[in-house]
Image (spheres, helix red, strand yellow):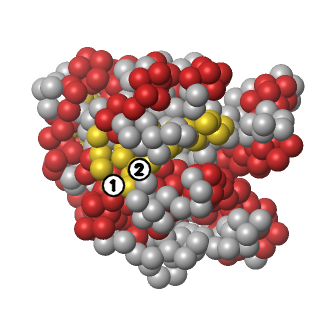
Amino acid sequence: MNKVKSIKNICCIGAGYVGGPTMAVIAQKCPHINVHVVDLNEQRIADWNDADLDKLPIYEPGLAEVVAEARGRNLKFSTDVEKAIDEAELIFISVNTPTKTYGVGKGMAADLKFIELCARQIAKVAKDDKIIVEKSTLPVRTAEALRTILHSTGNGVKFEILSSPEFLAEGTAIQDLHNPDRFLIGGAPTESGEAAVQALVDVYLNWVPRENIVTTRVWSSELSKLTANAFLAQRVSSINAISALCEKTGADVDEIAHAIGKDSRIGAKFLKSSVGFGGSCFQKDILNLVYLCRHFNLPEVADYWEQVIKMNDYQKHRFSKNIIDTLFNTVSGKKIAFLGWAFKKDTNDTRESAAIYVADELLQDRAEIHVYDPKVSEEQIYADLEYLQTNRRPQTVIASETKQSVEYSTLSMEEIRSLVTVHKDPYTAMESAHAIAVLTEWDEFKTYDWGKVYNEMLKPAFVFDGRNIVDKDQLDVIGFEIYNIGKGN
Ligand code: UDX
Ligand code: UDX
C-alpha cells in the first residue's frame, strides 16, 4: 500500500456528536466520495434518517442544512457495520471513549472497549488493505494497540493507522468544520504511512487550505488532542479561580478578562468565568492525561493538571453552596428554577454539565428543582441525575471556609422524579420559585419578561447567574437579589 490511494468510499463507525457532523460535512464538501456512517444504536440511525430534520439525534446549528444537502446523495446512515467496513478504503472510528467506571484506572483512564470492539470487527471483515483513522480522543499509543489487534488475523490484509483528532466544539461544530483553525493528521514515518496521510490530506483539501492541515507522527497527534483540551480547560479554571477572589474583593471578573484578553500573548477567548466547564471532553481528557503522567511516574506533572479539575469541582460546589447559604442555610422544600441544563448553549448535549452537579448538591438538601432547557429532553435530565447517583467521582473539593465536605447519599429514581420537575415553558418553571439558577448561557434567557417573572416569584426573589448573561442592572432595578459569578459588591 505505498502508492497514494484515491479515496472513493469512507466509512465512519459511530454516529454521535463527532462522527455525525464531521461525516456530514465531508460528504457535503466531497460529492465524489460515498460516506457511510454506521452505528450500533438503531434508534440513533433511524433519527439520522428521519425525513423530519428536527428529529436529528443531535441539535447543532446548521447541521440540518448540511444533512439535507448530502443525505441520499453520497451520505448514508445505517446499522450495517460489516458492509460499510467492507466497502470502504478509509474508516474513521468515532465511537465514544468514556472514563472507565470499573477496574484498573477506574474514574481516570479512558475505557477503550468500544475501540477494541471496532478493531476486532474491522479485522474480521476486511478483505483488502485499509486506512484506519482514529477520530475519537484516545490516550497516547492507542494506535499501537489498534495495530496489534488489526494485524492479528494473519490473512495478509494491511492496515495503516492514522490519528486525526477532532477539534470541533459543540454548538459551533458546522462552522468549525467548514473553517477549521487546523485539521491534524498523525501518521507513521514510513512510505506506506506517508501515503495514507496523503490520502487523508487529499480528502480534507476539498475545502481546507493546505496550510491549515498539520501533519505529525501518530503519538504527537494523539497527545496534541489531550494537550489542547487541557490548555483550554486550564484557561477556564484559571479565570474561575480569579472569580472567587473577585467576589471577596469587589473586583469584576469580566472586566479583568477583558483587560487581560487585550494582551495578544493571552488572547480574548476562553476567559469567560462560569459555574464550571462541562462537556464530554475536558474532564475526561485531563483525567486521562493525569493517568498517563502517573503511569510514567511523573507525579508533579499529574498533580499540576489534576488541579484544573479540582478547581472546576470547587467552582460548581461554591455555586451550589452559595445558593444554600443565601437561602438562609437550607433549600429543603424550596422551589429552585434551573434555566438551562445543557453544558453550553446551542447544543442538546448534557455530558458533564455543571447543572447536573449543582442539582445533585441541592437535591442532597431536598430542594425541589424545576428545570427548563430549550433543547434537552425530560428523560435525559432524569437519566443524567440517575447516572450520577452510582457514578460519583470522589469529590476532591471541600469549601475552605467550612472544611465541610458534602455527605452524598444515593437518591432513588423515585426520589429524583418526585423532587425534579421538567418544564416546557420557562415561566411556569420560575413561577412561585424561591430562586432562579442560570446554568447555561442560552440567548433566549436574555429576552425574557423579567418584570413578569419577578411578580410571580416569592420574595425576596433571588437569581444566581452562573453564566453572567442576564442583564444585572435591569434585574437590580426590578428588585431581584442577584448573585453573579466573580462580581463582588
Ligand atoms: C466523542 C468523541 O468521539 C470522543 O473523542 C470524545 O472524547 C467523546 O465523545 P461523541 O461522538 O461525542 O464521541 O460520542 P457519542 O455521541 O456517544 O457517539 C458515539 C457513537 O458511537 C454512539 O452513537 C454509539 O452508539 C456508537 N458506538 C459505540 C458504536 O456504533 N459502536 C460501538 O462499539 C460503540
Ligand atoms: C471542547 C474543545 O473546545 C474542542 O476543541 C474539543 O474537540 C472538544 O472539547 P466542547 O466541549 O464542545 O469542545 O465545548 P467548549 O466550547 O470547549 O466548552 C467546554 C466547556 O467550557 C463548556 O461547558 C463551556 O461553557 C465552558 N467554557 C468555555 C467556559 O466556562 N468559559 C469559557 O470561556 C469557554
Q: Quadrant of residue 250?
A: top right
Residue 74 position, x and y percent, is 23, 25
Is 420 situated left or right of 332 in this image?
left
Answer with mark 1 or mark 2, whichever residue precedes in sequence: 2
Query: Which residue position is annotated with label 1?
Result: 420
Residue at 27% from the left image edge and 55% from the top image edge: 126
Q: What count of labels does the image hold?
A: 2
Residue at 40% from the left image edge and 70% from the top image edge: 389
Does residue 425 appear in the picture of this structure? yes
Q: Is the residue marked by circle 1 packed among few (<14), some (14-19), or many (20+) residues within 10 Å?
A: many
Residue 213 position, x and y percent, is 60, 29
Residue 385 position, x and y percent, is 38, 60
Q: Give the Cα distance between marks 1 and 2.
A: 10 Å
Three-letter code for the amino acid on which mark 2 is drawn: Lys
Closer mark to the observer between disc 1 and disc 2: 2
Secondary element under disc 2, as helix, strand or loop, is strand
Three-letter code for the amino acid on which mark 1 is drawn: Val
Residue at 45% from the left image edge and 40% from the top image edge: 458
Q: Is the residue marked by circle 2 packed among few (<14), some (14-19), or many (20+) residues within 10 Å?
A: many
Tell me, for residue 335, which label it has, or none. 2
Nearest the viewer among 75 and 235 is 235
Nearest the viewer among 91 and 228 is 228
Q: Quadrant of residue 308?
A: bottom right
